[in-house]
Image (tube, helix red, strand yellow):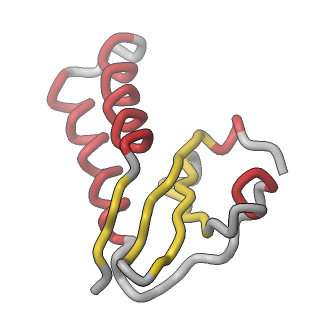
C-alpha cells in the first residue's frame, strides 16, 4: 500500500462540509460526523494500488492530477508520487467545469 498525504486544504474542506451539514441541513452532530468520516475513509482508500484516470476537469488535468469521485457528488484530485499519493483538492462536481 502507498502512503497517503492529505493537503491541508482538503482536510479543511471536509471539516467545513461537516459544519455545513450541521448548520444548514440541521443534521445531528453524530450524523454529520459519520458523513465526514465516510469521506475521510474514501480518501484513505486511495492508497490502494488501483488508480483512477486523469481528471476531465481542465484545471486539474493540466496539473497531471487524477480524479476520484465520492458518492457521485464530490471529486477528489490527487497525484501519485514516489512517496505515495498526495490528495491535493476536492470540490463538489457541480462547481467544476470541464
Depth check: give the residue in front, 40 or 61. 61
Does residue 33 appear left or right of residue 91 in this picture?
Answer: left
Report which quarter residue 97 is drawn in: top right
Does residue 12 appear left or right of residue 95 in this picture?
Answer: left
Depth check: give the residue in front, 82 or 79. 82
Residue at 57 percent across and 52 percent down: it is 75
Up-down: is 61 above or below 89?
A: below
Q: Looking at this rendering, what residue extends furthest in the left direction? A: 30
Residue at 76 percent across and 51 percent down: it is 59
Depth check: give the residue in front, 46 or 63. 63
Q: Residue 37, how many percent across, how many down? A: 24, 47
Quarter occupied by the N terminus: bottom left
Depth check: give the residue in front, 62 or 97. 62
Does residue 42 appear left or right of residue 88 in this picture?
Answer: left
Up-down: is 97 above or below 4?
A: above
Up-down: is 82 above or below 95?
A: below
Q: Residue 66, how many percent across, how many down? A: 61, 69
Residue at 57 percent across and 46 percent down: it is 73
- Numbered circles on residues, count: 0
Q: Residue 5, how many percent across, how many down? A: 33, 62
Report which quarter residue 18 is drawn in: top left
Q: Residue 35, how many percent across, how many down? A: 30, 41
Amino acid at each position: 500500500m502507498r502512503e497517503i498525504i492529505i493537503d491541508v486544504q482538503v482536510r479543511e474542506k471536509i471539516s467545513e462540509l461537516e459544519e455545513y451539514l450541521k448548520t444548514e441541513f440541521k443534521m445531528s452532530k453524530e450524523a454529520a460526523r459519520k458523513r465526514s468520516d465516510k469521506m475521510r475513509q474514501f480518501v484513505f482508500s486511495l492508497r490502494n494500488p488501483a488508480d483512477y484516470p486523469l481528471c476531465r476537469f481542465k484545471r486539474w488535468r493540466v496539473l497531471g492530477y487524477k480524479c476520484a469521485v465520492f458518492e457521485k457528488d464530490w471529486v477528489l484530485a490527487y497525484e501519485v508520487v514516489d512517496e505515495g499519493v498526495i490528495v491535493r483538492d476536492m470540490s463538489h462536481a457541480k462547481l467544476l467545469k470541464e
